Image (tube, coloured by chain):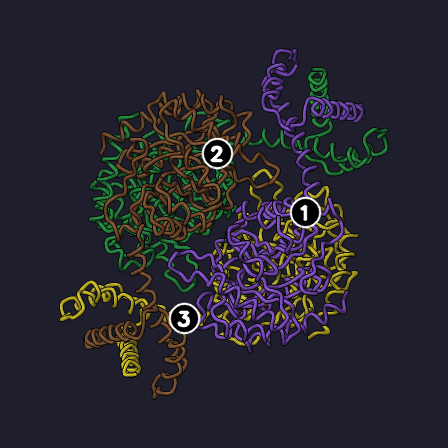
Chain colours: A yellow, B purple, C green, D brown
Amino acid sequence: LQILSLINDRASVIQEIGKIKEKQGMNRYDPLRERHMLNLLKDNNNGPLDQKTVDHIFKEIFKSALDMQEEDTRKTLLVSRKKKAEDTIININGEMVGQGEPSFIFGPCAVESQEQVTTVAEAIGGKGLKMIRGGAYKPRTSPYDFQGLGLEGLKMLKKAADQYNLAVVSEIVTPHHLEEALDYVDVVQVGARNMQNFELLKAVGSINKPVLLKRGMSATIEEFINAAEYIIASGNSQIILCERGIRTYEKATRNTLDISAVPILKQETHLPVFVDVTHSTGRRDLLLPAAKAAIAIGADGVMAEVHPDPAVALSDAQQQMNLPQFDEYYDSLMKFMKQYEMKI
Amino acid sequence: LQILSLINDRASVIQEIGKIKEKQGMNRYDPLRERHMLNLLKDNNNGPLDQKTVDHIFKEIFKSALDMQEEDTRKTLLVSRKKKAEDTIININGEMVGQGEPSFIFGPCAVESQEQVTTVAEAIGGKGLKMIRGGAYKPRTSPYDFQGLGLEGLKMLKKAADQYNLAVVSEIVTPHHLEEALDYVDVVQVGARNMQNFELLKAVGSINKPVLLKRGMSATIEEFINAAEYIIASGNSQIILCERGIRTYEKATRNTLDISAVPILKQETHLPVFVDVTHSTGRRDLLLPAAKAAIAIGADGVMAEVHPDPAVALSDAQQQMNLPQFDEYYDSLMKFMKQYEMKI
Amino acid sequence: LQILSLINDRASVIQEIGKIKEKQGMNRYDPLRERHMLNLLKDNNNGPLDQKTVDHIFKEIFKSALDMQEEDTRKTLLVSRKKKAEDTIININGEMVGQGEPSFIFGPCAVESQEQVTTVAEAIGGKGLKMIRGGAYKPRTSPYDFQGLGLEGLKMLKKAADQYNLAVVSEIVTPHHLEEALDYVDVVQVGARNMQNFELLKAVGSINKPVLLKRGMSATIEEFINAAEYIIASGNSQIILCERGIRTYEKATRNTLDISAVPILKQETHLPVFVDVTHSTGRRDLLLPAAKAAIAIGADGVMAEVHPDPAVALSDAQQQMNLPQFDEYYDSLMKFMKQYEMKI
Amino acid sequence: LQILSLINDRASVIQEIGKIKEKQGMNRYDPLRERHMLNLLKDNNNGPLDQKTVDHIFKEIFKSALDMQEEDTRKTLLVSRKKKAEDTIININGEMVGQGEPSFIFGPCAVESQEQVTTVAEAIGGKGLKMIRGGAYKPRTSPYDFQGLGLEGLKMLKKAADQYNLAVVSEIVTPHHLEEALDYVDVVQVGARNMQNFELLKAVGSINKPVLLKRGMSATIEEFINAAEYIIASGNSQIILCERGIRTYEKATRNTLDISAVPILKQETHLPVFVDVTHSTGRRDLLLPAAKAAIAIGADGVMAEVHPDPAVALSDAQQQMNLPQFDEYYDSLMKFMKQYEMKI
């Protein structure tokens, strides 16, 4: 038990170190002083511990001090639930995203024509939903693939959305496009490939519209949370996180839906969490089961792709639903949801 | 449209090839003949296609023929739903596993003492459940880690199980142990590390007890299905597949729960599919959300670890529930299930 | 053998299809026509094949036609060796990168002070080397990590480089920075996180300086090659590809050095290929063996981090060499190289 | 500086804990006592630290104590270089494996016929090499794939090997086969799928012949080392470790050759390390560059597959060399090696 009192003594010593550090200046990390202290210690070590051990122990102390500060940092991450316990709720076109009942974002992978998006918007609006997605600036692996219709596509999408009272969700790939696009976009999507495009994160952090941030293809959850922190640190707290599958060795699905990420993100942050069932599975036959799992595990919303004629779509032909499939899909989900609501 | 008739002609040619192949012998693959045919074709090629192109086309034809045969093979895999459309239902201690309502397997990671397993068995039996798990032969990364109590452990587990009318689920790691263990085990588990231990698969394929086959740490779904085929091909069709997480770069969870594997396995095979929420997440706080997702996506059962005092467990201390947590866990799941049942 | 003639017939039919397609218009993919053709075929199918089979076969034909066109595309990728057989050689500050003898890029992870970079520049220049690297715009996981000194850092680096006749290699993270940075950078690095920041790729594709393109953290080789194609398609063919390790489950190294990527990239493209041994291994003790492997397998150069006092570096402290280690490292590599040169 | 003396005090306290632990019993981990101590501490905590913090600190202390013991364990792993500094050298048929000069193991994937293995044995023997490989018991994903000729195959291989004075390297998949096989096998291979088949590891640990242990498909280096420890702990120290590629998302190669594993394994253990260039790359065109990289990075040997007519091989057709390719391959490697030897 004397260990206990020794540990309590040591704790106060650590606090003293902390205070000294604070007094000596603002920088939380001063390499020169660290080097200096290590040398000083070397000169004053009288044993019984040998120098190598002392060095090791002090490096551990420095490290644990840094870790404590990091832990503090995490606590004080603006996206952290430790910083803000209550859920962030985002009002998108009257829909309160994150308030408990799952929301839905449907729409084609890419905007291809006015007719195409209007047809889809009608189907979405007809279900009383509030959002439509559609890619206008398409990041594509090859420079020779269809790159999207750009601003023209956004205008088409906005026109269709307005007709059926929908909010437009669309991806922006560079800060440069943001200004021209903002008139036509209600929720700015940052895609998986751009999750660590920090200049883009800062740019969408300075606007006054919700941001849907997709997890990077091989981003850890910690990296994902820090990417969101870039946005909130720039002033925009209307962030929706979106799990969209991670890259693994398994090829039965396009990506591997990391469903556990949903409760972890809900626990670590106060932000709404969506699941993109289209990109995570890449298989039309899995869109429904994946959505059920997402809702059951606590996701705030589901995103899926709908196209009037997927077989001839300019991108993602294999994984989009056509309109009758969409109707059936939505009906099944609603049945599942009804049970689910009762539970709450 | 003349292409169409040509293709129909070609189809009959392919059928002829198939017949010739069949006539010429039983072996579906005869390398010498393939070589012979390639040489023969070379000698008889009059163009307009050059030799390299002809070689390429015929390799494609050979390959597509093999693919067709493989597709046939998949159809005729004994575990395939194409072979047997209706669900396999396995009667374990009166519980009809795979019949629609989720089943549960709980119990400690490892059998440590008679008292320990009896305590857990009482808790499980008290909920009206029918199965208890516990490791006696423990495959451990290091030869110096606790290797399980072996046969003695199994006897303890069986004694506890009998007291509370439970079936024993326990892992066997080598064909050699099977005989001695069978008196004390009701469901033989084949662990992730042994998913491709084909001699073990054949051995459990020749017994008359259900087998719980876990997915290998980095097994593809196709490899997993083929591992089950080894068991069924040896005569045992009472197989439960168990998704238990795959190895990925993400370290927030012990493994990454590949939840999409559940509907894929249900689609491709007629076997019941479980989810081991303990090993897939490795986090006590995720056991409940993961189980909900598993049930929602259509799993036939959930497996999780319960230990009277997890903090001092000889293995997997971080991820086992203690008994009060177990009670709470089970209650929450039952509430979730009640809603779920109504839906059906 | 009648199959052979049938196949030759079929080949000419396929050629006819190709011609018809070409005549009908410029677009290589016309969804409406594809739909139209499928319907037409349905109406004209007289068996013996059933409709489902005909559909399947024709989809295969369409797909193989697209595949052939894709193969053609790959042949005509501007970065492809099929397009340009001879190696691209890039003159950087008098060093002919890609000409057969390995080149080296050394320098600190981040520019921290004028003194720091001058010290390193002296060490590099003293070995007769021609390039120095150093990060000024640092993409960092957390917004609260040291973000680099920006333009001021570049000026420091340029000043140090000029003093010792070195070319500056430094990362640019957004098109917006490019203009201000170009006066101080001789080789523009595009980092792993930005490998699919297509707007940045286009921007560096329009400048007249060499680009060092790093492979994304979980990019496939095909995606990597296509990223380079974005640059060359925008007009800049001075591209160095840099393998820097990929994200896998293995945690003994920071990333997993995908050494096989080097010969594949050399085979598929005409561009010089470097290996960043620092980021791929993340371990100082592996910098030398990894560099030997890189050179032996045919890399055109090696990149590694050097810092006057790594223990107190503001980033990547664990993996940078100090100056005496750098001397020893370079000597060992030179000895290895001398043997190697003789071989050629 | 008073911290320094406090830390020295604390160190002696930790030593005392260690002694008390040792006195109280043999078991290095006693869960009941740990629980007891935590309760005792709770009763005696007088602050200023709150109970939660004290718990946390003591768990850290317990953990660091365990870590220290684990570090000790690693030091005392029998395969560890810390346990035995000098390289283990294994005499296989007169070839001193691990002595500095790379060794080579060639041969077909599977034994298919006497003629086949005799042809390959002649080619290998003709180069003055000492070992031939060939699979007789083939672990195959599907139960319907060619499963090897078993004991008959081994006899064929042995006959061919004897004729050209070669040692036989062949895989054993279950302890049960070991006895019958030992007369015909000189080096027992444990395959990737069986790296954690611990009963097999123990079985090959009890024989008096060298064991070639392949890394599991997704095994960490630490797991790999521990698998070798199972063998050596059972009494057999003649172990060759074999890196054979790991499973990642990249599909350009069959597996991803983790070349960094070679120096790490050489550093951590005293065992010879081989690289299987065939299975790690799965591409004939990469066999030579990969072998060069392996040798340059310090591998003790290279394994590659050779088949008289790969196009018609019963397994691994895409990646085996034919005999002329083998000649060219070996010549190129010898040239590379000659330079390399000079260096030493």
Q: Amino acid at mark 2?
A: Gly
- Mark 3 or mark 1, whichever is nearer to me: 1
Q: Amino acid at mark 1?
A: Val
In this picture, is B121 found above or below C57?
Answer: below
* Depth order, front residue of D277/C312: D277
Q: Secondary structure at mark 1?
A: loop
Figure quadrant of the N terminus of chain D: bottom left
In this picture, is D216 found above or below D112?
Answer: below
Query: What chain letter is assigned to the residue under label 3?
Result: A
Q: Answer whether residue C211 is visible to the viewer in this image.
A: no
- Residue labelled with disc 1: B79
Q: What is the crowding at mark 1: few (fewer than 14 residues within 10 Å), some, or many (at least 20)? A: many
Judged left or right of residue A12, residue C274 is right
In this picture, is C119 found above or below C99?
Answer: below
Report the number of numbered marks.
3
Q: Position of residue B226 (x, y in %)?
A: 61, 45
Judged left or right of residue B152, residue B225 is right
Judged left or right of residue A12, residue D291 is right
Q: Find residue C143 and report its image quarter.
A: bottom left
* Depth order, front residue of B235/D217: B235
Q: Amino acid at mark 3?
A: Glu
- Residue labelled with disc 3: A71
Q: Position of residue D260 (x, y in %)?
A: 36, 44
Query: What chain letter is assigned to the residue under label 1?
Result: B
In this picture, is D332 found above or below B187?
Answer: above
Marks 1 & 2 on one chain: no
Marks 3 & 2 on one chain: no
- Residue labelled with disc 2: D135
Q: Position of residue A57 (x, y in %)?
A: 25, 67
